[in-house]
Amino acid sequence: VAEVDFDAFFRARFDGVVRALTVATGDRGAAEEAAQEAFARALRRWPRVSRMERPGTWVYVVAVNVLRRSFRDDERLRSPAAALVAPEGAGPDHAGAVVTGVTLEAAVAQLPARQRLVVVLRHLAGLSTAEVADALGCAPGTVKSTLHAALARLRVELAEEDPT
Amino acid sequence: MSATVDDLERALARLAAEQAPVDATAVLDELHHRHGRRRATRVALGTVAVAAVTVGIVVLAVGDDDGSTVVRTVPGASEATAGAGTEVAELPGDADREVFLRPDAPPADIEAVRAALLADPRVEAFHHLDHEEAYARFVDLFEDDNPQLVEFTTPESLPTSFVVALVGGADADAFADDLRALPSVHDVVAR
């Protein structure tokens, strides 16, 4: 029964976690690996994880920690995800957005990596401020100030592109 | 143009929706496969002789592999004769059995098992997990769930083992019975 429960949980959440982490990092492969590792750990201790109030949040926290470890030695979590808005097979409209930078999506992709990760966890994954702080090992106040800075930056970038 | 939080959330949702879908079924199958191997190993090891570590904690040991390692011949390993086992530097990806020795097995007994595997025509390849390698797997298996157990466990307290891939069609039960008859072999378990 427990494994059936896990299967349902996995099917409901895995795709979303991969998508969110891809948006956060711009690296689909790393996102899939981190998500898979997080769900593997969830399966390993499913009796405990399944009793959590929000097991989906636990998966995000684990996955982000996996990502942080794998990215520790490189720049991916510290640099803009330029590739994010031009994924393989992206249509011409989207490619245009990358060139002109007029869309909010393009502006999000140009956020500094840390801001983008916080924005995704809070406003796409739906984690609370405290949960994001747990995932990133920082204070909730830091999450709030990072979100504030990210939104301010987005407004500035969009205003510069479209002064009207 | 300004950006509200609602605008931001819609933009993020659009970015997420543009990502290619995942093959959830394939990943789920892989997770269950890995989990099944891991659980089977743990259960099997419950029957294995276990060392008491210095503080008196009894350790049930060890092991997991994802079956994806590359098989290489160990430099300097004994020359395999035709039809006999070959010692390899990493875990055989398609291992069938694991031969556990007692943690205090003397070197001569370990060598006797190695010699038997090298000479056994039922053996395709095998790899010896020494104390250090057994400990590395032990840490991987238990560090999340039971860090205290890891803290009080030493490499020497864990049993060493030989992970064995048999040739196709070999009688695994007869192989296990033969190996169990050797000195210091505690058990032979399926992987």
Image: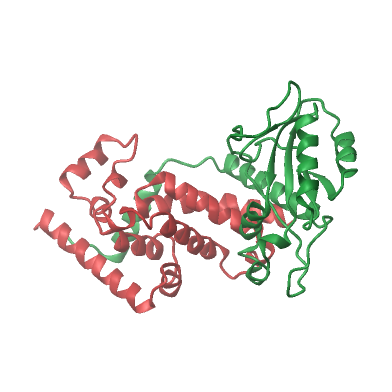
Residue B11: where, in percent of width, then height? Answer: 31, 54
User: Which colour denotes chain B?
Assistant: green
**Which residue does the image show at 42% across and 40% down from the upper left?**
B20
Report if residue A16 is visible in the image.
Answer: no
Residue A125: where, in percent of width, then height? Answer: 44, 60
- Asked which quadrant contains residue B73, the reply is top right
- Asked which quadrant contains residue B180, the reply is top right
Q: Is residue B82 above or below residue B110?
A: above
Image color mode:
by chain
Residue A2: where, in percent of width, then height? Answer: 72, 57
Chain with red colouring: A
Q: Nearer the viewer, residue B131 or A73?
A: B131
Judged left or right of residue A82, residue B142 is right
**Which residue does the image show at 81% across and 25% down from the upper left?**
B169
Q: Quadrant of the C terminus of chain B?
A: top right
Q: Is residue B62 above or below residue B20?
A: below
Judged left or right of residue B176, residue A50 is left
Judged left or right of residue B102, residue B128 is left
Task: In the displayed orientation, state which residue is furthest to the top.
Answer: B82
Q: Quadrant of the N terminus of chain B?
A: bottom left
Q: Is residue B145 above or below residue A103?
A: below
Judged left or right of residue A38, residue B178 is right
Q: Nearer the viewer, residue A128 or B116?
A: B116
**Which residue does the image show at 66% across and 37% down from the upper left?**
B92
Q: Nearer the viewer, residue B129 or A110?
A: B129
Task: In the displayed orientation, state which residue is furthest to the left.
Answer: A163
**Which residue does the image show at 26% across and 71% down from the upper left?**
A148
Report if residue A146 is visible in the image.
Answer: yes
